Image: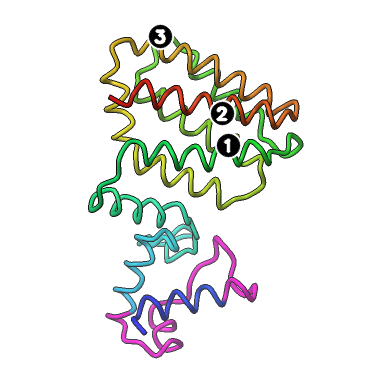
Amino acid sequence: MKAHETVMNWVTGELSSGRLKIGDHLPSERALAETLKVSRSSLREALRVLEALGTIRAATGSGPRSGTVVTAAPEQALTLALNMQLATSHVEHSHVYEVRLLLETWAAEHSDPSVGDWDSVERLLTLMDDPEILVADFLHLDAEFHVTVSRAAGNPLISTLMDAMRTSIADHTLARAQALSNWEATAERLRTEHRAIFDALRRGDRVRAAEIVRQHIRGYYVETAN
């Protein structure tokens, strides 16, 4: 077993048992190397891998924020994996559309208005209403809007997958938007559709919300397909 797998298994086991929680510090390098029976050089390499995957955060210095802290940010690992997939495979615009349609309509169909963070959603919509907003900033807020409303479905894996995918395709999405002949008209339509999605989800009309989401994603795909 590779050193980072040994460390990952140990962290996973400690988290599962409750002996370690997100935000806790790992033991010192020396203590952890002795516990896991690995060399300190192998341990350091393993910790670098885990930091890249978002499992831990390492900081030098002194104080409560220094040392190696468990973060368990799965979207970082998924984003890294998706970035590699997009870089090495022929992923087309239609593939992104199909995955978005699958994830986001499912989230709308299973949304629970009692658990939605509607204040945050409304804040995002207000920020997107700024007529002077840059395209890149609008798209960043747009992505955050879709991820935030998806959390009302109560399935953190769906939201994590959406977050990771949207981070991975951010450059692709921006290039498509900037190629549009009339971005202002597109942005205004998206604002209207976002409000309609928000209203349907907040009042618990899952069927209507899912249909608007479906039309919303399909319409933008058709508009940016060329």
Residue pictured at 35% horizontal, 87% vertical: 38
Q: Distance between the residues labelled 3 and 2?
A: 19 Å
Query: Closer to the camera, 107 or 5?
Result: 107
The CA span between labels 3 and 1 is 24 Å
Q: Nearer the viewer, mark 3 or mark 1?
A: 1
Residue 219 image point, x, y percent: 45, 22
Which of the two labelled residues, at mark 3 and mark 1, occupies the earlier sequence position?
1
- The answer to whether one can see residue 61 in this image is no
Q: Can you identify the residue that label 3 sits on?
A: 185
The kind of residue tagged 2 is Val
Q: What residue type is labelled 3?
A: Ala
Residue 23 highlighted magenta (yes or no): yes
Compared across the picture, whether 18 is left or right of 101 comes to: right
Q: Mark 1 points at which residue?
A: 105
Quickly name the residue at label 2. Answer: 213
In the drawing, does residue 125 fall left or right of residue 97? right
The answer to whether residue 76 is magenta is: no
What residue range appears in magenta?
14-42
Left or right of 31? Residue 208 is right
Residue 183 position by quadrant: top left
Q: Is mark 3 on a helix, strand or loop?
A: helix
